[in-house]
Amino acid sequence: MKLAAPALPALRAADFIELTKPRITLMVVLTAAVAAVVAAPGHMPVLRFLHLLVGTALVAAGASTLNQVLEHEFDARMRRTANRPIPSGRLQPDQALLFGVAAAVTGLLELALAVNLLTALVGAATLAGYVFVYTPLKRVSSLATVVGAIPGAMPPLMGWAAMRDQLGPGAWALFGLMFFWQLPHFLAIAWIYRADYERGGYPMLAVGDPDGARTARQALLYGAALVPVSLLPAALRLAAGLYLLSALALGLGLLACCVLFALSRSTTAARRLMLASVLYLPALLLLLVLDRVPLH
């Protein structure tokens, strides 16, 4: 019994951390950070950059938490989400709600007071789009995947706004890159877990697509669009030749995985596409940072 007592606080802390969807939060922070590095005018304002990271992480954590509060009844029906803290009963919805609101509000205040108002406004729009538009739309229409890609693509706008206090063409190029990257990635996930989504009552495109033809076609179209969009940073002189050639090679590689998925429409091909998309994004972002052209 003496060994069991201290385990409870640790377990509860782990549950609150799980509410934040750490991998998604990390991706949000990473994309905002890369945009900030690319947009930084010569000397990086380190303190502002750190406030950006903290504020963005808190807003993302709050959004993920509130998403789980709203979806906990549906999560309970799905095998891949049934053990989340709320549907499993380890946390109560009101506890999670308080935690999510506190994280989101603290993050927005951090951005408004320590970065700039524009970054906080973009963060607020991202939060609202994810929680109040995308989350309820998931239960109504398969278009939620496309709509949800909009707030998912906005963290680079936050990073750019933090350094420039405005949103220029470079910011929107990074937004486009993130938007088109998400769609093949999430369509592959939807195909892999289509039975689970059907149990949860989510009308994903893959749920109403028995042979996978529409799902694969959409993944292929968005994967094809990603190739030229990923070259925009070089066209805008945000990055140089190494990025241009590498982005082209990476984009064609991801597109090849989309083609293989479209041809076979198998779970194996969908997993391959999902893995390729997971590897693609950090590789591209790293190349963008390494080969960036400093702005003035």
Image (cartoon, rainbow, N blue to C red):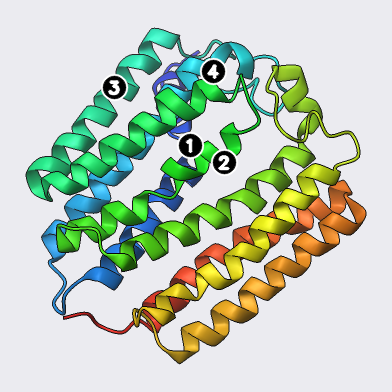
Q: Position of residue 213 (x, y in %)?
A: 85, 45
Q: Which residue is mark 4?
A: 71
Eye-nearest disc, 3 or 2:
2
Q: Which residue is mark 1?
A: 21
**Badge 4 local density, few (<14 within 10 Å), some, or many (20+)?**
some
**Badge 3 local density, few (<14 within 10 Å), some, or many (20+)?**
some
Label 1 or label 4, whichever comes before in sequence order = 1
Residues at marks 2 and 4, CA–CA distance in whole angstroms: 19 Å
Eye-nearest disc, 2 or 1:
2
Residues at marks 2 and 1, CA–CA distance in whole angstroms: 20 Å
Q: Is residue 241 visible?
A: yes
Residues at marks 1 and 4, CA–CA distance in whole angstroms: 14 Å
- For this rendering, which residue is in front, 253 or 278? 253
Q: Secondary structure at mark 2?
A: helix
Residue 146 is tagged as 2
Amino acid type at mark 4: Glu
Q: Which residue is mark 3?
A: 101
